């Protein structure tokens, strides 16, 4: 596995989905109806940004914008993604006017685990709790869904 795909691994190496979602934690609605913005890195090294998708999005979703990842560096809890062009929607920093490494996306894992109670639509069945890991991406709140706990 390329090292750039390990950017969201949790300590137990479990990641529910490959997306990094905008916001500070999972919303308290059914994951099937949650429409959010997110980004991911593909197996072939593209940084993709999506608008209005949910966790059940499959390969049919088309990114709103994308760029080829030119370089990836991980130092401690911080990952650095370098691209030649900006990805619209992501808080990237322009670091150069020329060359392969013109834009930088900085992603820092905070090790803050957040719980969201998701009520059940069926009154005879209990809800669940979604556990998320908070990240700061370009200084903004993002999260990665880590796991769901059912009673």
Image (spheres, helix red, strand yellow):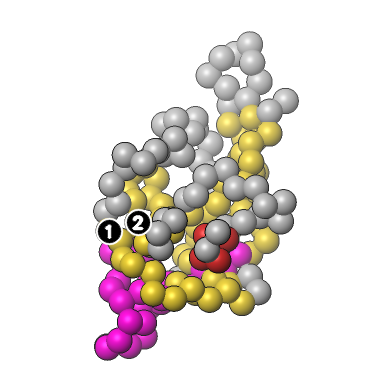
Q: Is residue 93 magenta?
A: yes
Q: Is residue 37 visible?
A: yes
Place residue 91 in its image quadrant: bottom left
Residue drawn at (60%, 64%), measured in percent from left and top? 109
Residue at label 2? 49
In the image, 111 versus 72, the foreground residue is 72
Residue drawn at (27%, 88%), measured in percent from left and top? 98
Residue drawn at (40%, 38%), measured in percent from left and top? 57
Secondary structure state at the residue bearing disc 1: strand
Secondary structure state at the residue bearing disc 2: strand
Query: Horizontal placement of 106 versus 118: left or right?
Result: left
Measured from the top left, where is residue 50 in percent x and y? 34, 51
Place residue 117 in its image quadrant: top right
Measured from the top left, where is residue 13 in percent x and y? 67, 52
Give the Cα separation between the discs numbered 2 and 1.
5 Å
In the drawing, what numbered circle is on residue 65?
1
What are the residue bounds of the magenta stretch?
82-109
In the drawing, what numbered circle is on residue 137?
none
Query: Horizontal placement of 75 versus 151: left or right?
Result: left
Depicted 130 relative to depicted 15: above or below: above
Crowd class of label 2 (few under 14; some 14 to 19; many from 20; radius 10 Å): many
Residue drawn at (41%, 52%), measured in percent from left and top? 38
Q: Are marks 2 and 1 in contact (CB under 8 Å)?
A: yes
How many numbered marks have been drawn onto this rendered protein structure?
2
Q: Main secondary structure of the magenta part?
A: loop
Crowd class of label 1 (few under 14; some 14 to 19; many from 20; radius 10 Å): some
Place residue 58 in its image quadrant: top left
């Amino acid at each position: 596995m390329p090292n750039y795909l390990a950017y969201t691994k949790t300590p137990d190496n479990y990641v529910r989905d490959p997306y990094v979602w905008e916001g500070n934690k999972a919303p308290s609605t059914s994951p099937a109806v949650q429409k959010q913005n997110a980004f991911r890195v593909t197996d072939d090294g593209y940084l993709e940004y999506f608008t209005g998708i949910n966790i059940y999005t499959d390969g049919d979703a088309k990114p709103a914008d994308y760029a080829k990842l030119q370089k990836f560096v991980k130092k401690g809890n911080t990952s650095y993604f370098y691209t030649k062009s900006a990805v619209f929607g992501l808080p990237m920093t322009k670091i150069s006017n020329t060359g392969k490494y013109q834009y930088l996306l900085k992603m820092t894992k905070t090790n803050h685990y957040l719980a969201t109670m998701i009520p059940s639509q069926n009154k005879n069945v209990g809800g669940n709790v979604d556990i998320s890991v908070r990240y700061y991406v370009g200084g903004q709140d993002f999260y990665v869904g880590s796991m769901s706990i059912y009673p």
